[in-house]
Amino acid sequence: MRVHKIAAIPADGIGTEVIAAGLEVLAALAAQDGGFRFDVENFPWSSDYYLKHGYYIPEGGLEKLKTFDAIFFGAVGSQHVPDHVSLWGLRLPIAQGFDQYANVRPARVLPGVKSPLTDGQDIDWVIVRENSEGEYSGNGGRVHRGLPTEVGTETVIFTRVGVERIHRFAFELARSRPARHLTLVTKSNAQRFGMVLWDEIFAEVAVDYPDVKTDRELVDAVTTRMVLKPKSLDVLVATNLHADILSDLAAALSGSLGIGPTANLNPERKFPSMFEPIHGSAFDITGKGIANPIATFWTAAMMLEHLGEAKAARQLMKVIEAVTAAKIHTPDLGGTATTADVTRAVCETIRMDQAASV
Ligand code: IPM
Ligand code: MG
């Protein structure tokens, strides 16, 4: 029996609702397969926890997390803590501390889901987001606070090691897909140092991947291409901030922010990787029981894949698609189903799958 040690960090807002749903689905899959099981430990680290203790991650917390095979993360962000405090208190220490430099964000219009684009069915992208440096390097400062002469700096850092490894990761991923097409997204017309470094290293790495078709797009121009010619894109590689923005657009074009999954990968597996829905805490619907759990289920499928459970990952994706096709949709997708309805439908379909295969 393969045992996968999972650290669940539901954290804030709808994070607690969708992670609970995700764990139910994972348990149903494990019960049905029989070849593996999950050993789940729940971590209470959240903004409420911070308000009580003064920190998100207690002393020794990261060391403890290191002993897990994967981290299943909900969302961080609260109306009672400034966003930059919560982000730098919880999610970034894990992503950066565990060198999860490759952030993978697939986007596809699932069956039964309506895209705002008429040719939405053509969306089949993976956005590869550099996740360890760039605009999220945390390098800056404030001086002369409150004075008219006040200055704030936010210096973007790109390193050769950081840029080369994300390009290599993106090329490998592009190579594994049927279209074998990688688009480099930068802004090297206006930003003539770091972004030109990105372009140059991309060209160097491309030499090792003659079987991958490449092209380049400026970040502003790629937004119009995503909307007007979705089929012309396959895998995109972009900086931390550019890809953050593009992945929200990708999720909206795929029908809802409630669908988009993410993997924060440490590809060398020196540290555990972290899996999370991209939607965030969503205070407006927290506690109403109507959060769309599909992003978390899709995220769980990515986690299964990473844990070596490819068969279960494929099965879960098929089940998710059967449930979206049956229009068991939460309000963000125009339906009236609750989180529990969607979760129940997914778990029942998993069990029916088992009954059919006995
Ligand atoms: C994301 C989110 C985060 C980010 C927020 C919560 C800081 O938008 O994962 O896309 O910008 O990285
Ligand atoms: Mg974002």
Image (tube, rainbow, N blue to C red):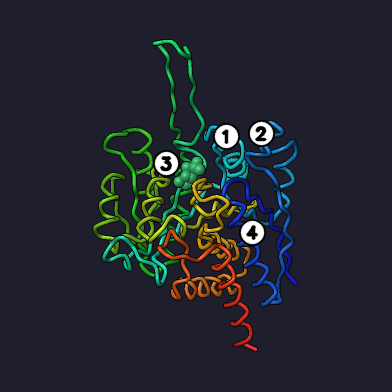
The mark that comes first in sequence, 2 or 3, is 2
The answer to whether marks 1 and 2 mark residues whose Cβ atoms lie closer than 8 Å is yes
What crowding class fits label 1: few (fewer than 14 Cα within 10 Å), some (14-19), or many (20 or more)? few
Q: Residue at x 71, y 54 (%)?
A: 68
For the residue pair 146 and 180, the one nearer the viewer reads as 146
Q: Position of residue 235 (x, y in %)?
A: 38, 58
User: Would you say 358 lies left or right of 124 here?
Assistant: right
Q: Amino acid at mark 1?
A: His
Residue 247's place in the image compared with 58, above or below, is: below
Disc 2 residue crowd, few under 14, some 14–19, many 20+, Cα 10 Å: few
Q: Is disc 4 surrounded by few (<14), some (14 to 19) or many (20+) residues within 10 Å? A: some
Name the N-terminal-most of marks 4 and 3.
4
Would residue 125 be visible to someone looking at this image? Answer: yes
Of callouts 1 and 2, the N-terminal one? 2
Per the image, the residue denoted by label 4 is 20
The quadrant the N terminus occupies is bottom right
Residue at the spot of label 1: 80
Residues at marks 2 and 3, CA–CA distance in whole angstroms: 28 Å
Residue hosting label 2: 51
